[in-house]
Amino acid sequence: MTTDVGLIRTAAPGYALDLSIWTVLKWTVAICVAVVAVFPIIWMINVVFAEPGVPVSINPRLLPTSLSAGIAKIDTILSETSYLHAYYISITYSLLTIAGVLLIGSMAAFEFALFEFPGKRPMFVIVMLSLMVPTAVTLIPTYLLTANLGWLNTMQGLVVPGLASAFGLFMLIQFMRTIPREMIEAARLDGASHFQIYRHIALPMSKNALVTLAILIFMQTWGNFIWPLIVAPSPQMYTVGQVVGLFNAPFSHVTVDIVMAANLLAALPPLIFFLLFQRKIVEGIAMSGSKG
Amino acid sequence: MFDKKHIPHLLMVFPFLALFAVFFLYPIVSGFVYSFYDWNATTTSRFVGLANYQRIVHSRDFSKAMWNLGSYIIITVPVGIAVAFCLALLVDSFKGFWQNFFRSIFFMPVVLPMFLAATIWRWIYTPNIGLLNTTRGFFGLPSVQFLNDTSTMLYSLIAVDVWVSAGFNMVIILAGMKNIPRQYYEAARLDGASKLQEIFYITIPMLYPVLFFVTTYGVISALQVFDTPWLLTGSSFSQYGGRQNALLFPVMDMMGRGFGELKFGQAAAYGFILTTVIVSVTAVMFALRKKGHQP
């Protein structure tokens, strides 16, 4: 016992010095990385909220300089392009996808996680195998199918093909497996129907997983670029991603601050979402990663 | 044999399975059939056997795209994971509030949609007036055409890619680090192990499954890279891939054939070639993992 204390005491001064160098270094690196991580985002905000004609890149500064100029640019974009409409399309697309995946996925996950029924094993295996199939192989045939259904440039064309999310199902199954069987048996003895058990026990108990999945799906649909690009090529169905792509096209004669204002508008929903739900998002990704 | 009591179960899984069959299984099968036909939006289809496959494999764009893909993956996956691992170590060394703070800040780029990250970076890379080139000018260095000079294009793409993906991988690796029992570190410290030894003899071996997942996932998504190079180059079906196709990747090539040239048969065949590549690479990685686990 005494020797232990002595050891610590003799080691302490050197250890403390070592620690402080380590600490300084660690903080420096962390702050540098933080700057690299957020700088492009800050730069975007700075370009938008600056007097036109004074590009931030030529006159770098850390803080936005003109709030009114930024608002004026955003106003220009909203009034001169169909940006608001694209917003409407993107939000509807995201919300419908979230609602659909959560409903359909949770119903299927409820069965796969808690019950036995004929054909369960093979169905489950096929769905899980599909997680390994790259989107490249289904992209073109799914597009052709959607086109044959007459769903090009429609909301159902955007939403429906993405509803059977194997990833979502997998995540919900993992979660619903932890629901105690006794609760289900008890509810059954109380005369609850199968659907009531799903609705009043399984759904409330997996609220956390459902919220996390909803957030992940939002991020994914809002950022989905390739599917809207091919399935909704008409301007009436442009998503925010496509409008940003237009602004970004090499021969569109717009200045950097207008492009960045368009970008900022597209970045706002996910950024706000992140600031509100950062814990859930980060943990959701960590969970899906460590279990997958 | 069939029991009535199964009906509610089947009713509940039906919506998912129906959509899954129609929008996932059917496209795979039909795509396989399409890949043997010469087919576009206007002409009637004609069975051509393996001609689509041959035409793709022998085309110059295909070899260019595959070559680009190979060099891209070899750099971007290891660099991305090394960066993510170091970030995870860094974040892990903080406690409480600051740990969450840095974790969130480092994660920020992941939240931005890919298409946005690409467009912002495109402006940062702009010759003469872009942020990077004005900074270079400040130090008296000449302006670089990051996205138009075949010697820098690939690295410019990789920088964006690492910037975007590092936070994602970091979060997963960090979660893995939290699962390593603290006693291991305490034991190592008692034995007088240095910080570096702890990392190499405890952290990395214990993280093996997580690192394997991150690597596999990274390789699979890198094989399908599309958004970023598409938006960093021409970003339209008539123009993509950049100068001398230095940023042409297989999925872009496939999309170009399908929607640019309306050769859907070829595009479908392309999808299957790509899938074969992806499945083989994944299989090899799993086989190597198994081998690595044997004593």
Image (spheres, rainbow, N blue to C red):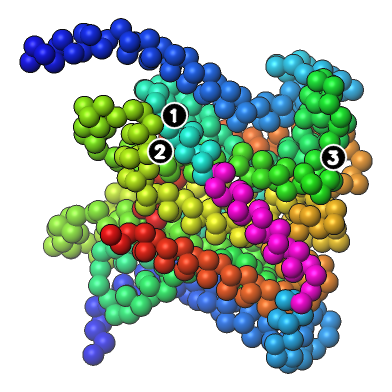
Callout 3 amino acid: Gln
Q: Closer to the N terminus: mark 3 or mark 1?
A: 1
Badge 1: chain ID? B
Range of the magenta residues?
Answer: B58-80
Q: Would you call the spot at circle 2 few (<14 residues within 10 Å), some (14-19), or many (20 or more)?
A: many
Q: Are marks 3 and 1 on the same chain?
A: yes
- Residue B197 shows up from this direction: yes
SS assignment for the magenta stretch, majority? helix
Residues tagged 1 and 2 counted as in contact (Cβ below 8 A): yes
Residue B133 magenta: no
Local SS, label 1: helix
Residue placed at 57% from the left, 26% from the top? A34
Badge 1: residue crowd in 10 Å (few <14, some 14–19, many ≥20): many
Give the residue number, with chain letter if any, for mark 1. Answer: B91
Q: Quadrant of the N terminus of chain B?
A: bottom left
- For mark 2, what is the residue? B174
* Mark found first going from the N terminus, 1 or 2: 1
Q: Amino acid at mark 1?
A: Val
Left or right for A129, reference B119: left
Q: Observer-nearest residue: B125 or B63?
A: B63
Nearest to viewer (mark 3 / mark 1): 3
